[in-house]
Image (cartoon, rainbow, N blue to C red):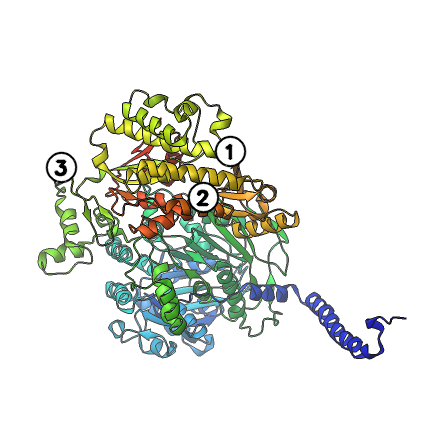
Amino acid sequence: MKILWWNAPYNDVLHLSLVFAVVPWLYSYFNEQHRKQSYSMEQAVMLAWERVITQPTMLFRRVVIGINCNVDMVVTGTSLLERLNGTSTNRKDHEVIRNVNDLYESFAYFFSRGAAAERHISDPKMFQILAQFAGEPRHRPHHYIGGNAALMAQKIATSFPRTTTYLVGPIGPRSHVLLHPSIVRTNSTRIVKDELHVIIEYKQGEILDEYVAPASSRFITSHDQYSGSAVVIEMFFKAISQFNPDLVILAGVHLLQNQNKEMRMEKLRLIKRSLLQVKHNIPIHFQLGNMGNPDHVAEVLHRIVPHVDSLGLNEQELAFFSHVANGPYTDLYPVFPGAIHVYKVVEMLYWLLTKFGHDSTDPESKNYQYRLSRIHFHSLTFHLMVYKGTDWSNLASGLAAGAKVAARQSCKITNDLNTDNLELRISKAHLLDKEIGKRYVFEPQRPIASWMRNDVIFIYTPALICKFPTRTVGVDDAVSATGLIFSQFYRFSACKKLPDLPDLNFCEIFKMAFFKKHNFLDLLKQVWISGRATSSNRGGPAKWLDDAVTYADVQTSFVDPCTSLPYPEKELHRFLEKIPKIKKEANDKIVVKRSSSKKLDFSHIPIEEQVVVLFPGQGTQYVGMGKKVMNCDRAIDIYKEASEILQYDLLELCLEGPKSKLDQTVYAQPAIFVSSLAAWEKAKTENETLSVRTTDVAGFSVGEFAALVLSEVLSFEDALRLVKIRAEAMQQCSLRYHSGMITLRVNAATRLEDALEDAKAYAWEKDELPLCEVANYLFCGMKVIGASENCIDFLSSNQEKYVFQVVKRLDVNGAFHTTLMKDAANMLKNALKDVKINQQPRVNIYSNYTGKLYVYNEKQIREAIVKQVCSPVKWEQIQQLLHAKHQDFKFPTFMEVGPGKQLGAMLLKISKKAYKNYMSYPV
């Protein structure tokens, strides 16, 4: 009788080992569940934030911060107000405090709302008396480093030792001692006596006469003389060029409101002009402070906010922006802390980012020149991170880290589980976005919510409020600083010229990286952040000069003609004299020059006279193609020559069909190729200068072969034979499996990679080929997916889950430009061996495979032609390069030659201005 191995007597040790392994695991699992249930709501939120926080892979290493620094004298309670013996009992907001009664009324106004405020005392004697009274022992004064810029520098220096901080501001003897020793500071802005701010802090429930504070907050008074001075501003921007930072933080601009209008406007112009000269690969964060002058708020909003990349603000500042600029909910200002609805804040943030933020979709709009793409909003009860575009990442970590710092700093908590003094003041369920109906249901283990409206992404978390805060000053600045350092920033544009790099192949670079990791990361970073060019390099005169030039600049240019201006001198003369540029007559002699990069130079042809030819791809065919070229002998010859090579009457098929036959890949591709070139021949007969004015050519998919013929890289006969082989091979591959192509509309919230991988897994479970790949990049937000039938079904059924929209299914019978076509690529490669390649094209030609200009090397041309069959068509990248040809927003003529107008429709999505120069030449 056989004994099962499990019951064998010598397996006792195995039994025991399994028991000893399973029992601890079960104990650990159930103990962990019990431990989670034992957490309070506040502890669960703190731990949930900790799980979300991840360290950025690209840390900001060097930060320049300016422009305010002072010493805060903090006193607690309202006894100081009583000591001043004011006679008023009213509450009223004063933009500037001129006497004791103004101080009392302003303090009572914000005290009764529990709102933070900062006001300037115009009378130096009164401020001196206030500081003297505040310094009395009975008020228990404490001195800390103050000023938004200094507080943010202090936070970064103490919490992020790997980041070097450079502070520019009026630093006196005491503030010099209070600053963290690692903060780099400049001697050029040292002052003999510190700027002093007197801060009156009060707690929730504190009483002042008949008023009760609904929340803990503070009231700041100041009489600054140096913060916001022209010298400090100039030294701040000078430090940016000297220190070469990864991040710039601008704070303290709110202090300019205390100066007269002429001086204030002069300095705002100086700041704006200097901001416009900061490289676009260096992010600029603008930290707002409390303001009371609506004129100054409007000036800051229109002059400064659009020209920074990031913005930090609270509910008071946001509501004030909306109030002065006629935004949403203008009647909310001033706001009661903790009393504002989330959906109202969301509406104002959406308005702020869309009206004053960067818009990459329309180069003709003024928002295209703007930089703002990130807003970090923090209030007493909740925080929001709002952004658009792809420049910023890791923002959920920044939001969670900032919210956590707010709770820890206000209550001086050192342990995340010590949350006895913290509480949540939000409803369990509330509305987040009224426009799209987004609601929030609180879960302690998952407190963060995110959603998208159009191209703007929102990330939301409730905040933990300290019941008995030990200090309220500086919490906002700590939140913003922490959120910034945990964020990542880079700009990447495939259309821009990358920095000059060593002539190394990738293998050599990676070998170098193996030994010099940090140098390689720096190299990558230089490549990644080569984003939008600065305003002065966008072609044409600097449009900002009229608004940014200052009286001092103009005056200096007359007094000292040798003065070096921060912008080209010719721009100043343009501004002063308004002399129009004289256009040079174009040279009629067509001489094509080659640059060192092998890109053909047609600069001798005015940009508005240049022609860019676009050839369409499969899917544009229709019965009747060729009717419009029947009166052109050369076009008829093209069809006849093609029929001899193909061994069937192509013209008859194009004119009469049947459609079912014409739509087959094996016939459609040659028909589109030949018909497009026939239309080109007719176009040349109607416009004799068309050929010599054509500078660039590109074709979509099979249209690329027509482009290769026009550029004289391939002969017509060779190209047609290759198209015939290509079409037959692609149709043969498509018949092996049931597959197709669908168009998707995606956005920044789309989890496309996850969707493709999950679709493959679904197909695998159904015993089908797991094919699901991007086949075409059409334009921003629109992609074509080539996939098997089950993958297509999966994507169609899970649009909401992965946040995309299936626009339509294409009328093709295979997943072209995917790995399904590898055998077709190999067949084309074999056919290409005996074909002659011309390495000196007549015009610039763009590759579907690389999304860039062809490299005019025979080996690389062959490789690009072959790999195009089984690789995505990068039409979006090609369009961006073609769009970048404009000069002074003058565009060449974009001419679509062949059946259909699909390429023109995609050009319209890129630029309405460029589309005005679009024309279709049908066949």
Q: Amino acid at mark 2?
A: Asn
Asked whether residue 604 appears in the rendered view, the answer is yes
Q: Is residue 738 above or below residue 639?
A: below
Extreme-right residue of the structure: 1
Q: Which mark is residue 811?
A: 1
- The answer to the question of whether label 1 and label 3 lie on touching residues, with beta carbons closer than 8 A, is no
- Which is nearer the N-term, disc 3 or disc 2? 3
Q: Amino acid at mark 1?
A: Asp
Q: Quadrant of the C terminus?
A: top left
Q: Which mark is residue 132?
A: none
Q: Amino acid at mark 3?
A: Asp
* Residue toward you, 191 or 104: 191
Place of residue 911 in the rendered image (x, y in percent of width and height, measured from the top left)? 35, 39
* Residue toward you, 798 or 41: 798
- Residue sitting at 45 percent across and 62 percent down? 487
Asked whether residue 898 appears in the rendered view, the answer is no
Q: Which mark is residue 776?
A: 2
- Which is nearer the N-term, disc 1 or disc 2? 2
* Label 3 SS: loop
From mark 1 to mark 3, how far is it between C-alphas? Answer: 46 Å
- The answer to the question of whether label 3 and label 2 lie on touching residues, with beta carbons closer than 8 A, is no
Q: Which mark is residue 588?
A: 3
* Label 2 SS: strand
Q: Quadrant of the N terminus?
A: bottom right
From mark 1 to mark 2, how far is it between C-alphas? Answer: 15 Å
Place of residue 809 in the rendered image (x, y in percent of width and height, measured from the top left)? 53, 36
* Label 1 SS: loop
